[in-house]
Image (cartoon, rainbow, N blue to C red):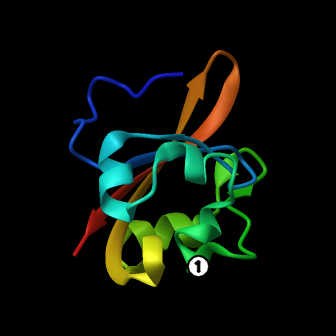
Amino acid sequence: MSNSSDISDNLPVLMLNDNGVIHECNQACEKLFGYLSGEILWKHISTLLPQLAGIALMTGTQINPRLHFLAHIGHHFEVVGLGGIHFASLLFINEVESMGQHYLRLIICPT
């Protein structure tokens, strides 16, 4: 699975499965969070975005409507980087399909 060419390499992008487990992390994410991709792959997204703990990211085959709404209106999400550094960020969420699998793409934009 590779990032779509329409997403710039300088934007932090995470690919998650339906359960919120991180499957892919680009270099911009490594830079933003201070982790190497190998340190966060296969961890739950709540490791980096604590507000997503206990929230179903998907309802059936759709992005959770509440989460989609919050991202759409520009809600600031708390992000935690290496060493416990906290900062606010906007999220952009969409669903993508790759090789018959569904993933969530999170684009993180620090504010």
Q: Is residue 25 left or right of residue 72?
A: right
The residue at 50%/45% (across/down) is 37
* 57 shown above or below 98: below
Q: Which residue is mark 1?
A: 50
The residue at 30%/54% (across/down) is 31
* 47 shown above or below 102: below
Residue 63 in picture, x, y percent from top left: 62, 54
- Can residue 90 be seen in this snapshot? yes
Task: Quadrant for the N terminus, please.
Answer: top right
Residue at the extreme top: 99
> Image quadrant of residue 102?
top right
Residue type, numbered disc 1: Pro
Residue 72 in picture, x, y percent from top left: 38, 66
* 29 shown above or below 67: above
Task: Quadrant for the C terminus, please.
Answer: bottom left
Residue 92 in picture, x, y percent from top left: 38, 57
Q: Is residue 108 left or right of residue 47?
A: left
* 46 shown above or below 27: below
Query: Label 1: few (<14), some or many (≥20) within 10 Å?
Result: some
> Image quadrant of residue 73?
bottom left
The residue at 21%/43% (across/down) is 10
Circle 1 sits in a helix, a strand or a loop, which is it? helix
Front-lying residue, 41 or 103: 41
Residue 47 in picture, x, y percent from top left: 61, 69
Front-lying residue, 85 or 16: 85
Q: Is residue 50 left or right of residue 71?
A: right
The residue at 75%/53% (across/down) is 19
